[in-house]
Amino acid sequence: MTNPLTSLMTMLLKRLRYIIALLGSMTILLVLYIQNSAVFFFTCKRAQRASHICLEDRGNSSWFSERYKPTVPLLLNSTNSELHANIFSWWNELQHVPNVANYTEVVNQLFSLFPDEEHYSDAGPDRCRTCAVVGNSGNLLGSNYGQLIDSYDFVIRINKGPTENYEMDVGSKTTHRILYPESAVDLNDNTHLVLLPFKVLDMQWLISAFTTKKITQTYKEVPSTIKASKDKVMILHPEFMRYVHDNWAEGHGRYPSTGFLALIFALHICDKVNVFGFGANSNGNWHHYFDETLASFESSSHGGDFEIQTINHLNQENKISMYKGLT
Ligand code: C5P
């Protein structure tokens, strides 16, 4: 026969164990709840902050809406490559290099080699992609913008603009580099090569640079090859070039400068556009930050003065943030 005291103790012990198990589970649930709430809270805060960055500058601007065409094709792929006759003839006559190749055949070759995708079709109210477009102006020297530039999601650089030895002023991150055969430089594996084609031969050069390496000459000598990731290659659409010329440069110059095209490209693929290294320095010099060559955008084939006016206008309308350097 069991002692009543023993059975009472056993029962109490059982209850105690039950209560401890219950309290344990409740504590675990509480900890999980607090953890999830904290994650949710901070994610919301971050999203709010991010969307605040993207939304703060948006406003209605009829000047902007008259020019901005959200449906323009930005990058070439096999399904959007057919060109209206007037666009093809404008584009094909930009540079006076005789075209003997068949555009359609070259495009087919391009997309048997490089990604045939619809890029950046993810625009919407929830996207908050911040970008830096870095031009090659000498006004970057001494600016200390490097860290700021590197803090953006995309850093778009242009032509030969180097980062090595200029990190403090221009940063070191490059997600995209816009170039053409005559301005080509080697890229890191994680950088998108964005070809700016001024002629069919430029597309052929791109193919050749990754295959036979036979093309070494356009209107001047060009590199036979380029170090870059084949699966990160993109090609600006000729129709986009014409749109920038008509809508944003308003027909000034024969065709837009690479930097201006890069900036308008960023307006389309980014939600917050920060612009560095455009324009003359405070002495009115248009030289590059990396050499003493005086670039002559204000009087070249690019209508540089008008481009700078338009960039300043975009800044005034809060569509971009312009950083003019200190020099
Ligand atoms: O000289 P480059 O064309 O390589 O420079 C890249 C771009 O930087 C130019 O197309 C132009 O838009 C911009 N730039 C500028 N002011 C300078 C030098 C370059 O706005 N002084």
Image: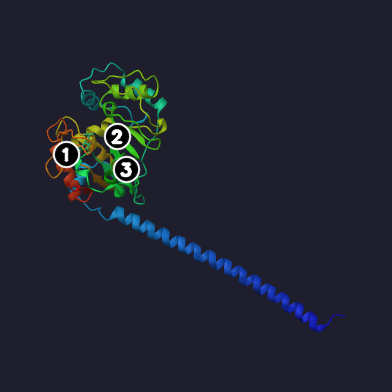
Q: Which residue is mark 2?
A: 178
Task: Locate residue 234: give its quadrant.
Answer: top left
CA–CA distance between discs 3 and 1?
21 Å
The x and y percentages for residue 58 are 25, 53
Would the CB of label 2 be found within 8 Å of ligand 1?
no
Q: Residues within 10 Å of mark 1 (few under 14, many from 20)?
A: many
Q: Residues within 10 Å of mark 3 (few under 14, many from 20)?
A: many
Q: Which residue is mark 1?
A: 307
Task: Give, as a three-letter code, the residue at label 3.
Answer: Val
The x and y percentages for residue 4 are 81, 83
Indicate the quadrant containing the N terminus: top left, top right, bottom left or bottom right.
bottom right
> In front here: 262 or 326?
326
Residue 108 visible at all: no
Task: Give, as a three-letter code, the residue at label 2.
Answer: Ile
> In front here: 277 or 211?
277
Earlier sequence position, callout 3 versus callout 1: 3
CA–CA distance between discs 1 and 2?
18 Å
The x and y percentages for residue 227 are 37, 29
Earlier sequence position, callout 3 versus callout 2: 3
Q: Which residue is mark 3?
A: 155
Task: Locate residue 169: give its quadrant.
Answer: top left
Q: Secondary structure at mark 2?
A: strand
Q: Ligand 1 lies in which image quarter?
A: top left
Task: Give, as a three-letter code, the residue at label 1.
Answer: Glu
